[in-house]
Image (cartoon, rainbow, N blue to C red):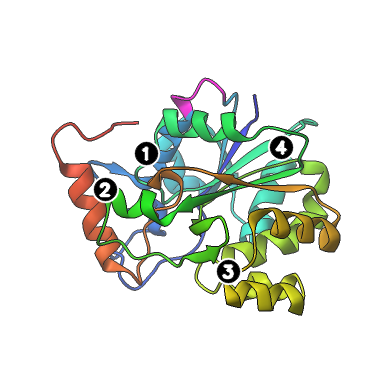
Amino acid sequence: MPPAIVLAGGGPEPRLAPGLPNKAFLTMGGRPLVVRVTDALRACTAVERILVVGPPDPLAVLLGNAVEIVQDQDGMMDNVTAAIARLPAVPRVLTIASDLPLLTGDAVGHFLGLCTGDYSFYYPIVPQAAIERRFPEARKTYVRLTDGVFCGGSVLLFDPAVLDRVRALVERMMAARKKPWLLAQLFGWTTVMKFAAGTLSIAQMEERAFEVTGIRAKAVVFDGPEVALDVDAERPENLKALLRALEAPGAAEG
């Protein structure tokens, strides 16, 4: 059972209400986003410990003693490093963004159950159809592969022992959620051309990732929007769609 690190750092954004430290504190469906995510993790029996990285005082007000709070640092991977420093040696760590309002304990458990095999890094990719089935109006940046059309998620499972090697890969992958060519560039021009032509497969991307980084990485196909449909200030239509879903009668509560 891996520990989980919730990334709730960052600064204020122009579209946020005055006084909110960052979007992790935005209330949706009656609960702040960071509370929704931590509640989902607490509901998952496959997660044994939860650390939340962000501004300590506001987080303490919301979360109390339910989780361990870690002072946020300069950047995302700095935050991951600071949280890992609090942990004993573990084979896998789950890292998750704080702005996934659809996340549930079942979704977390399902993702972890898909992370099979002897890999050091697992990253969810979500089919376009899985997003549009429930949220046809949502906008995401999709990548066309021979296996289908996918967007990236905001969850990672990895071996902390490869943190130094995985750092550049993670930062590039997170940037590539909106600019996919950045990820393709990391893998060399042959991969770029296949990527542009839509002739690149998941297996080829995994193989190339190993050649470039020495890390055995696996793209995990997750058939649902829970790990990918985040709150993006640049895409207000997504926010509206998420609010409607969370405010509907019978909406999931964790």
Do the residues under discs 1 and 3 have CB atoms within 8 angstroms?
A: no
Give me the residue at 13% from left, 35% from top.
249
Q: Cα distance, mark 1 to mark 2?
A: 9 Å
Seen in the picture, residue 89 relative to 244 is either above or below; the reply is above
Residue marked by disc 4:
86
Looking at the rendered image, the disc whose residue lies closer to the viewer, 4 or 1, is 1
Residue marked by disc 1:
36
Q: Cα distance, mark 4 to mark 1?
A: 23 Å
> What kind of residue is marked 1?
Arg
From the viewer's side, name the closer residue of 73 and 7: 7
Tag 1, which secondary structure? helix
> What kind of residue is marked 4?
Arg
Q: Position of residue 71 (x, y in %)?
A: 60, 49
Tag 4, which secondary structure? loop
Tag 3, which secondary structure? helix
Quarter in which the C terminus is drawn: top left
> What kind of residue is marked 3?
Ala
Task: Residue at the far top: name it.
Answer: 45
Give me the residue at 40% from left, 64% from top.
140
